[in-house]
Amino acid sequence: MALPVKERVRQDSEPIATIYRNLGTSSAEQVVTRALGELALTMAGLAAQVRERELQDLARQLRRLQRMSENLGMVSLGLVAGDVRTCLDRGDVTAFSAVWARLVRVAERSLAPDKALLDQTFS
């Protein structure tokens, strides 16, 4: 029997609201769109590294993902990226695999184009 996994994605709307207050709508949309694109590219790069088992630079890239997530108020994504780094640092292959799968699920939900479909909680 396969158990369905449903990740709750927590977000904090304040970082993006601050960007909009400081830059205005037009500029803020550009900045946020670019930042989300960079975050998606970083996640794709991490996935490629894990798939190819190239782990030497993975901790640095996970830290980058964590910072980017925090800057955009993506609480869950930032926390899970930190958890993956911890598993990597400890050399725990089993935990790394499980938490990596969780990171992929959270990233997919965090970067989903239709946020209204997600069951998010705001901190």
Image (spheres, rainbow, N blue to C red):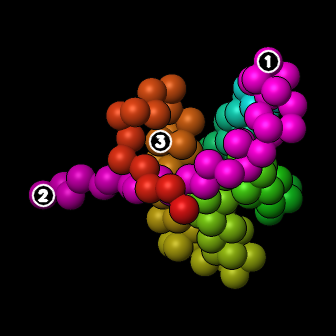
Of residue 65 and residue 56, the one placed in the foreground of this image is: 65
Q: Which mark is residue 1?
A: 2
Q: In which image quadrant can residue 78 be found?
A: bottom right
One can see residue 42 in this view: no
From the top left corner, tell me how far across and down residue 66 is, in percent: 74, 57
Image quadrant where one finds the N terminus: bottom left
Q: Residue at x 79, y 18 (%)?
A: 26
> Residue 26: which numbered mark, if any?
1
* Kind of residue at badge 2: Met
Query: Within the image, what quadrant is residue 107 found in?
Result: top right
- Which residue sits at x=70%, y=42%? 17
Q: Nearer the viewer, residue 33 or 57?
A: 33
Extent of the magenta region: 1-29
Which residue position holds label 3? 109
Residue 111 coordinates in the image, percent (x, y):
56, 36
Q: Residue furthest top?
A: 26
Which callout, 2 or 3, points at the residue further toward the start of the chain? 2
- Give the position of the C terminus as an image quadrant: bottom right
